[in-house]
Image (tube, rainbow, N blue to C red):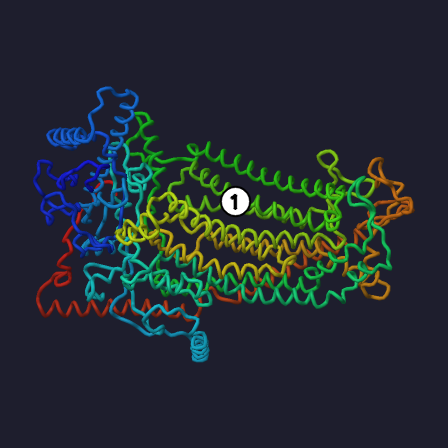
Amino acid sequence: MRRSESYLPVPGEDKNLDGDFNGKTRNDESMPMKTLYASDGSLLHLPLGPYFSDGQRRVDYVLTYGIQKPSAIRRQSSKLSDNGYFHRLWRSLSSRSSRAPLQLKEDPEVAATEQQANYHEDDKRFKREEFEQNLQEMGLELEKDEGGKIAGIGFLKIHAPWAVLCREAEIMKLKMPTKQVYEVKQGSNLVEKIRLFIHKVTDPLHPKVGPKRPEDVKSLSLPFSKEKQHLFDLSDRDKFFDSKTRSSIVYEVLKRIRWTRPNYSLGITSLLANGVYTSAYPLHDGDIDGVTAEPNDRKLLFEEWASYSVFYKYQPIGLIRKYFGEKVGLYFAWLGVYTQMLIPAAIVGVIVFLYGCATVDDNIPSMEICDPRNNITMCPLCDSVCSYWKLETACGTARASHLFDNPATVFFSIFMALWAVLFMEHWKRRQMRLNYVWDLTDYGMEEEDHNRAEYELRVAEKTMRQDQGAAKDEKVKLTCTDRMPAYLTTVVMMSFMIFITFVIAFGVILYRISIKTALHLSTYPAARSNIRATVKTTAAIINVIVIIILDEIYASIARWLTTLEVPKTDKSFEERLIFKTFILKFVNAFTPIVYLAFFRGRLVGRPGKYLYVVGSYRMEECAHAGCLMELCIQLCITMLGKQLIQNNLFEIGIPKLKKLLRKRKSELTSKQEEELHKTLKRYEKDHVLGPFVGINPEYMEMIIQFGMVTLFVASFPLAPLFALLNNIIEIRLDAKKFVLELRRPIASKVKDIGIWYNLLRGLSKVAVIVNAFVIAFTSDFVPRLVYQYTYSPDGTMHGFVNHTLSYFNVSDFQNGTEPNPPNFNVKVCRYKDYREPPWSNTSYELSKEFWAILAVRLAFVIVFQNVVMLMSDFVDWLIPDIPKDISFQIHKEKLLMLDHFMKEEGRRRDNHNHDGYTSPSSGIASPHSRPTFHTRAGW
């Protein structure tokens, strides 16, 4: 620790927690734990790279912990000797008295608080000491740095020597490339020629990530074994295990090591949860800018991936997987496939929109609405304050509705249903190809899934509560009964949050009703000129703001509820969290959209007998052209709002704002901060970065977007285009965040995207049903079809508008609901519905046309759903999940592996007969590897 007025001067030998406190210095070779102080107490010179103080051993992992404030009197744990304790105490008191006189009178409460804090700090220090001793016994090498430029933070650097890497790689069954390579057959001659031609044409779009092995050659990978090291290329041991693999190996060791005490034990997750260590992370490879920045994978990722200037290029998925691991690599591979598949969907959507623009002047219903010669008087839109209005004033809305409500949207809905199936099949094949290239085809889930810290703590508490007479050999675990209060809380809270969403959506409905009435009462001509557009737009913006705010709240509530359930493993925790978050965010995002699509305009009633809610609020009506236009506006503003606000404000603006606030609080100038940053060591720079919280938020954002693109695409054909433009930015935005702003994540090995695939598949199935109902009930496609082939006198759409309007005698208005002042010139007004006229014997009852159209609508839903589902299942069956060439290569690799083993055994047998010596590991073992190792209790 540096000597300053803020810290007590402690000699270098006292920094070693496991050292001799009488002044004797430990030999570095006999003790792997090192400190950064020389024998005279001076700070050693450290390299700025990711290395130990010797500049040779690489830092594979870093644990940080809080350093107790030096103004408090440090009590040492019972592990330390009494002489060392009093010696330290005397020196601390002397040092304190040299700065300021001791206070003879002290507040007892303050003294008790400090004493309790010291006790907790000593307890944490004692746990760290024993845990670190266990790490050393496992062969890991440690080095501490408590004198860095980040005040109050100590760093424990961990290095895994060659022997530990080999041992753990064998335990983890890591597949490593051997010396043998073989030719990869890409397919038939025609397929190979097509592939080479496409690769040559798209060569400028591929990132320049340095020299790489030809695609038609692959190394044979085998599970690593110390006894078969001669099979692997060990010419450069420093590069055989890359930084990602080294950090994952160290992390596996950390998860297995326990700080053991009677009745319970604590692993690294528990130690982090209890504050014994404050953070744990692997290091980035190096800097990305500056003249002195050496070439590294991080810098290459920044130049070829995390830059907006390369937005048109493919992603370097192989390099992403090499640096961040398979889990992150699969996410960006999936996002890349999704974005590529959006290109044809966006093109077809634009064509459908342009078709609507080209045919709007030929649309007969729109022309009839806009024709002033029809002189159709419509009933008031609200009670008392609203007057009668002419149908021709809805001309603009009718023409705009045709852009999205035309025969081409039916084709587009069928196309998008098949597109979703093709996307899923394409991803499965792409995922299988990546599994083969990344040697994940034989990867299973037999690896141990370690318990979470909270689960271990709850089990320990339950163990201590158990009766003494309980069977000691019975394994204690949390049962469904133990979790029942948490499950009940989850059900109640989830139901309450969904109810809150419905209440807020209903509140927006009341806003629309009241603001419409207020604008009609307004005396300003500008306010009365375009009431419908004002109400639609402002309500949609309010919905977007509410959705974004509730998204953040629901994410926190879902995590809290999942924590209450105390899942046993990280995988179980993640799946439960994803499910809860998805349900809440899906309901939050789609409740206003579902209302506009299926409920608005259907719970209205009729003139003279309207439906009222909350007293005198009359339910909303759709415009004459239908609610599809309002649904389109809501989808458009929701997609744009979520993308612009959540991406630009939350992911870009807030981090920049925090950085600006830190600069304003800092007493250093920008140039001084830059110079200080250059002097920070690698692990100090990474500690300043934000912690990696997983990729589930990124997945969730894309899944909700996928729902927007597929579920209501019949009402908004431009949704794929908006999603495409957003994803082009999203890929580079996420890349920049991963490379620049976040600590490097632990490389997690997975072979698929897990529960997200099931959610995607479920959404694609639901999308078929939703689009069938949107076409049948929200749009006018079915009524137009029925009129043209059943009621039209000449087989055209002439007279369709008049056919959809019913008559109402204004004398039948309820008292207090008629327009004020009344218009005595109007005897009959029209409204959109299929009802009998007032002069009929069954006046205002639903007409036979209504029931005929309803029957056709239901028939359309059934036919559309079954036909599209059948086509989707056929496409699913037609396209195999595993590409034929990959299936062949996997079989070939297994035969090569068997042949390779047989040849090696024959060669070893020949050597054995020639030398007359039998030792399975002679001449193989590494000079640095340990002959044996012992596992500790608590693994």
| Image coords of residue 740 (percent x, y) | 37, 55
Q: Choose between 561 and 525: the one closer to the eye.
A: 525
User: What residue is disc 1 on?
Assistant: 551
**796 left or right, relative to 157:** right
> How far across and down, in percent of the image, does residue 107 sit?
28, 20
Q: Is residue 56 above or below residue 136?
A: below
Q: Is residue 127 visible?
A: yes
* Residue at (82% x, 52% y) in the render: 390
Mark 1 secondary-structure assignment: helix
Residue 842 in sight in this render: no
- Horizontal relation, residue 361 to residue 94: left or right: right
**Residue at 54% in and 63% down:** 342
Residue 446 position within the rendered picture, expressed as x and y whole percent measured from the top left: 34, 51
Q: Residue at x 58, y 67 (%)?
A: 347
Q: Quadrant of the N terminus?
A: top left
Q: Quadrant of residue 51?
A: bottom left
Residue 189 place in picture, x, y as percent: 43, 80
Q: Quadrant of residue 824?
A: top right
Q: Is residue 295 above or below residue 167?
A: below
Residue count near mark 1 (Cα–Cα under 10 Å), binned few <14, some 14–19, many ≥20: some
Left/right of residue 343 with respect to residue 825 in the rendered view: left
Name above or below for residue 617 compared with residue 232.
Answer: above
Reply above or below: 819 against 218.
Answer: above
Q: Residue at x 66, y 52 (%)?
A: 631
Q: Nearer the viewer, residue 289 or 97?
A: 97
> Quadrant where the C terminus lies?
top left
Identify the amino acid type marked 1.
Asp
